[in-house]
């Protein structure tokens, strides 16, 4: 991870690189702020810069540093860092038992998955997302006593290939009370050339004894200009309301990406809905079966989401017909002719049966009934109800 790949945060990056270049490096630092502001990504880029053999920096000239100070990205150390394969880079993070890993778990058991998760998401990650990735449901993850023992074991290893051994502890607020004393002792009396980079979302939940032993590095919201620049590098839907995304994201790139994904999904569903209901009026078998083929090729979760979208859309149409209520967000199908003409077809005569048929289909999809048959069946039922 290089600083150039961090979204925004240049003032903080300048401060950090200046401190590294001056050699006044604190042995324990806490990067704190929402995960979507980039604390973990910054910690990684910081570690890579520190160990880079060919840093790009500009001495003390701030205007130049403003744009450029960074690791080189191509020396042996940087290359290993970028694959998370450097032997002096270590991670500890909250973990929980899974079907495959017993109750004696620690972050060591999930290291491979953690690395892939970070690389796939460019280091902008959340604990819930990671647990979903691991298929851990509703479990309180913790950094436990086995993690603390592992930290001590690693720090006592003598051989290392670079000047600094880096220990990144992600989500330090999840440190279990029983594991704290061991960690406190090392933070108090660090081994030589070991750097602790702690990352946290919620400093209020961190033990005060830990807080008093670290240097605080506040990570603030990503500014709108940087966020907007980042979004412009993505393949966004044409009608995406970027200012709305920026406002709702509140400087948090994970929020922004969630909003974008929802919007992409809604657009896809709206297009499917329009094609589908048009087929239901005409009932041409060939084109209808093509649609059914496409719908049943989606994953079951997505099929359910589409049906829920259809359910809400029919309801919104009904409300417009009978009460003149215009839920404009739900009633924008991206096709003006359809937007105007379709809602009137949903009345008290058919809404109840439409809802019933869709709910029945969702229930059957959850029970793994053949989805091609289900979508075909549903299409015939609704087609009758629309006429
Ligand atoms: Zn380098």
Image: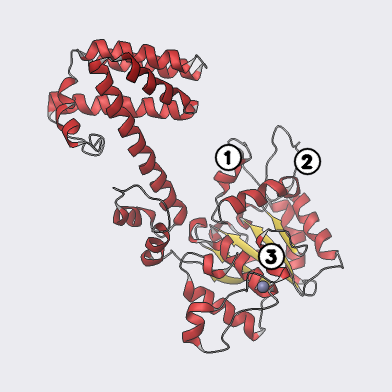
Sequence-wise first label, 2 or 3: 3
In three-dimensional space, the C-alpha distance between marks 2 and 3, rounded to whole angstroms, equals: 33 Å
Q: Nearer the viewer, mark 2 or mark 3?
A: 3
Query: Can you give x and y, in whole percent of width and height, for residue 315 in the image?
Result: 25, 25
Q: Is residue 94 visible?
A: no
Residue at the location (67% across, 74% down)?
50
Of 82 and 150, the residue lying toward us: 82
Sequence-wise first label, 1 or 3: 3
Query: Can you give x and y, in whole percent of width and height, for residue 259 in the image?
Result: 39, 47
Cβ atoms at labels 2 and 3 below 8 Å apart: no
Q: Residues within 10 Å of mark 1 (few under 14, many from 20)?
A: few
Q: Is residue 8 visible?
A: yes
Q: Which mark is residue 132?
A: 1
Image quadrant where residue 352 sits: top left
Sequence-wise first label, 2 or 1: 2
Query: Can you give x and y, in whole percent of width and height, for residue 76 in the image?
Result: 73, 69
Query: Can you give x and y, in whole percent of width and height, for residue 68 in the image?
Result: 52, 78
Q: Is residue 39 left or right of residue 178?
A: left
Q: Quadrant of the N terminus?
A: bottom right
Q: Is residue 68 left or right of residue 291?
A: right
Cβ atoms at labels 2 and 1 below 8 Å apart: no
What residue is shown with label 3? 79
Q: Residues within 10 Å of mark 3 (few under 14, many from 20)?
A: some
What residue is shown with label 2? 104
Q: Secondary structure at mark 1?
A: helix
């Amino acid at each position: 991870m290089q600083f150039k790949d961090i979204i925004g945060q240049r003032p903080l990056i300048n401060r950090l690189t200046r401190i590294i270049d001056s050699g006044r490096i604190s042995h324990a630092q806490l990067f704190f702020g929402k995960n979507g502001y980039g604390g973990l990504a910054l910690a990684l880029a910081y570690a890579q810069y520190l160990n880079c053999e060919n840093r790009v920096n500009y001495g003390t000239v701030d205007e130049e540093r403003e744009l450029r100070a960074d690791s080189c990205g191509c020396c042996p150390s940087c290359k290993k860092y970028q694959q998370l394969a450097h032997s002096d880079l270590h991670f500890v993070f909250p973990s929980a038992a899974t079907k495959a890993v017993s109750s004696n778990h620690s972050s060591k058991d999930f290291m491979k998955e953690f690395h892939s998760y970070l690389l796939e998401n460019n280091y902008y990650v959340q604990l819930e997302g990671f647990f979903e990735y691991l298929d851990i449901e509703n479990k309180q993850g913790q950094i436990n006593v086995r993690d603390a023992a592992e930290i001590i074991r690693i720090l006592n290893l003598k051989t290392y290939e670079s000047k600094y051994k880096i220990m990144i502890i992600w989500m330090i607020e999840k440190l279990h009370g029983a594991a704290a004393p061991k960690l406190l002792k090392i933070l108090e009396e660090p081994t030589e050339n070991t750097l602790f980079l702690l990352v946290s979302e919620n400093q209020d939940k961190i033990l005060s004894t830990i807080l008093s032993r670290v240097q605080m590095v506040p990570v603030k919201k990503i500014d709108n200009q940087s966020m907007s620049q980042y979004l412009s590098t993505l393949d966004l839907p044409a009608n995406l309301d970027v200012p709305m995304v920026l406002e709702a994201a509140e400087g948090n790139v994970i929020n922004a990406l969630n909003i974008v994904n929802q919007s992409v999904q809604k657009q896809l569903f709206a297009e499917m809905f329009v094609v589908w209901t048009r087929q239901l009026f005409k009932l041409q078998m060939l084109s209808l079966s093509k649609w059914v083929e496409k719908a049943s090729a989606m994953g079951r979760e997505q099929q359910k989401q589409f049906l829920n979208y259809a359910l809400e859309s029919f309801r919104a149409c009904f409300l417009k017909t009978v009460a003149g209520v215009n839920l404009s967000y739900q009633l924008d199908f991206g096709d003006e002719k359809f937007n105007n003409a379709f809602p009137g077809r949903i009345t008290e005569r058919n809404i109840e049966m439409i809802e019933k048929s869709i709910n029945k289909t969702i229930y059957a999809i959850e029970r793994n009934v053949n989805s091609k048959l289900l979508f075909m069946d549903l299409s015939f039922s609704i087609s009758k109800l629309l006429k």
